[in-house]
Amino acid sequence: MSQLTPAHRSGRRTRWVAAAAVTALGAGTVRARRRLAALPVLDLAPHDPAPLLGWQLITAPGVTADEATLRAAVAHAVREGLQVLDLVPAQLDAESTLGLLRLLDPAGHRTDRCAPGHGAGHALLVADAVLGRAGLDDAEPPRSAADLFRLVRTLKEYAPEATGWALAPGVTAPPPDPGWRAEELRARGLPPGLLSAAQLAGLALLVKCGVSAPRWGLAAAALYWLQPAAVLAPARGPRPADLARATALRPLRSLTTALGTLRTPSADPPEPAGTAARRAAYLNELVAGTERFFEPRRTDCPWCAAPDLAVRVRMPDLLQGKPGRFTLEECRRCGHVFQNPRLTPGGLDFYYRDFYEGLGGEGAALVLGRMSGTYRDRAALLRPFTTPRAWLDVGTAAGHFCNAARTVWPDTRFDGLDMGEGVHEAARRGWITTGYQGQFPDLADRLAGRYDTVSMHHYLEHTRDPFAELDAAVKVLAPGGHLLIELPDPESRTGRLLGPYWLPWFQPQHQHLMPVGNLKQALAARGFTVLAEQHGAAHQGNGDFLAAVALLANRLAPDPRAPWAGIPDTPGRRAARSAVQAMAVPCYAAAFALDALGTVAARATDGGNAYRLLARKALG
């Protein structure tokens, strides 16, 4: 039997890659067509004029809208029950239209309360009431399209089911300015450098496939080349003036745009206001070292008191890159994994700072806002057992779970509790009814017996004393009430495979990781009966391997601009970080495929990286 030569094996792999590229491009084209068909077109025919009082039209510089368009937009918003309406110019250039359709699903985002707000960045019709609740009624006019991108993201949070989009033939806009592309991508929540590197890698892959596997490779190249015309030419509504030119010159334009973005000075994000003061404060704290942030190492298990401990993993702060090293130890008797030595309250304050709020607030919000399906699955777990009336979400952060859970339980009152200021913002948005800021055990007596449902989603592992948190839940729940808990699973096989680069270790924030058997015993000891247990369904499909690549890249080239960075911020270090991120792009693609397979395997085997328990408190 003849064996394949390395050249033959390489050619076969290239054909598979080219076939995958054709499939992905074809699916993307069909998806864009479907989304475009879901985008309504404003009706400019004469009709009964809607009152303009109570609405504001906010436009980017150089954008104009005639009165007929404004009246049609208000009429459309009133008819559809909208409070925010993004107006997409019908003559928006082809690439900008395609870019919008990659991000925006007009039908899905209208009903997805947690979907991020995306828009064309030209004109927004907004109800005065929404601007008032968001504290933006006296805001300065937008200075660029990037400001409109940020504004629609914010306003979608205040009108989660009342934000819509429409093609507006009467809106005119200037051509895009390539010099602003990096800032505009960042305003959309997209990293300009990484996106441009991925675009260049994709173009290089098409060239390689075209040379090594001509049949599939040329098909992929042709589909990419003709995609603007395939999506927009026969479409109802949009009429990009540059469609023919954009289609003919697409590969060249893509190349020059990606290279231009990488060379643009604004590809590096500007330092936020107050960065100098923040950097001075961090460096002043770090003068005394990080040892003072740790308690003495304990010699027994905090769960079962056994003295038989073993090191599970050691790592630095791979999330933010703050100084310090952290050790997770495992009890050989009960399997409990815990941080040892444990951070002091002052240490927790230092390492949490600028993660969920401050510098890291926007990134955390983007991640939390992309988990709508997971939030709904958690809420739906109660369906066979109860109809919740008063629900307290402990560790709610900015209330994303409660916001999404309202689609499952529209008549339920959702309240939230958290240590951070975001709980008050969640109340202003209307995602929760009441927000409590503080420690759960400290507030338990005040809230005793008020709730028939309490949830703790990826919260218990952050706490210093999980037993005290469970005791607080017993107090707050009415007799027969339900407790829903979701946690990372320290018994996950992927955790052992990836070592310190397994995201759910989440050092230095995670203090305790409990095997499911331990938690079930603790619940039984407090009078709870476990009603449901999920592993595969609770698997976090947002990327064990993707996160591992990101953590490794961050470790190899930490951000020199971070205010706690102990290295000088030089152009060379910034370039090195960009180079590492660019080289990681193929690894991200492979990791994405591995994560997709891992999610399928987790669902099929009821395994995965997390578990979920629903328990009922005793009636007596």
Image (cartoon, rainbow, N blue to C red):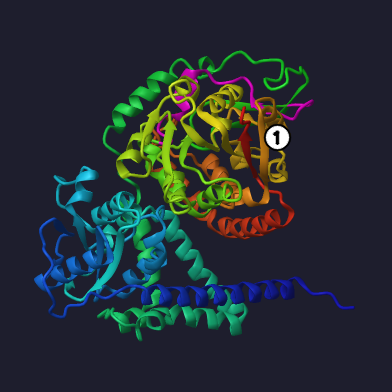
Residue plotted at (51% across, 75% down): 27
Depth check: give the residue in front, 46 or 33: 46
Is residue 580 something that shows in the picture?
A: yes
Mark 1 is on which residue type?
Answer: Pro
User: Can the viewer see residue 570 in this picture?
Assistant: no
User: Would residue 441 appear left or right of 47 to someone viewing this image?
Assistant: right
Q: Is residue 178 magenta?
A: no
Q: Quadrant of residue 309?
A: top right
Image vertical order of residue 521 relative to residue 491, above or below: above
Question: Measured from the top left, where is residue 85 in percent x and y?
Answer: 25, 62
The quadrant of the picture occupied by the C terminus is top right
Q: Quadrant of residue 274?
A: top left
Q: Position of residue 161 (x, y in %)?
A: 34, 57
| Left or right of 207, for residue 354 | left
Residue 542 horizontal/vertical position (percent): 56, 51
Magenta span: 331-356
Quadrant assignment for the N terminus = bottom right
Residue labelled with disc 1? 515
Q: Residue at x 64, y 40 (%)?
A: 613
Q: Left or right? Give the position of 63 relative to 339.
A: left
Q: Nearer the viewer, residue 97 or 489?
A: 489
| SS label for mark 1 | loop
- Relative to residue 344, is residue 501 depicted above or below? below
User: Who's the residue at 60% across and 73% down the image?
Assistant: 20
- Magenta residue check for 343: yes
Q: Position of residue 17 (x, y in %)?
A: 62, 72
Task: Give the residue drawn at x 73%, y 21%.
Answer: 304
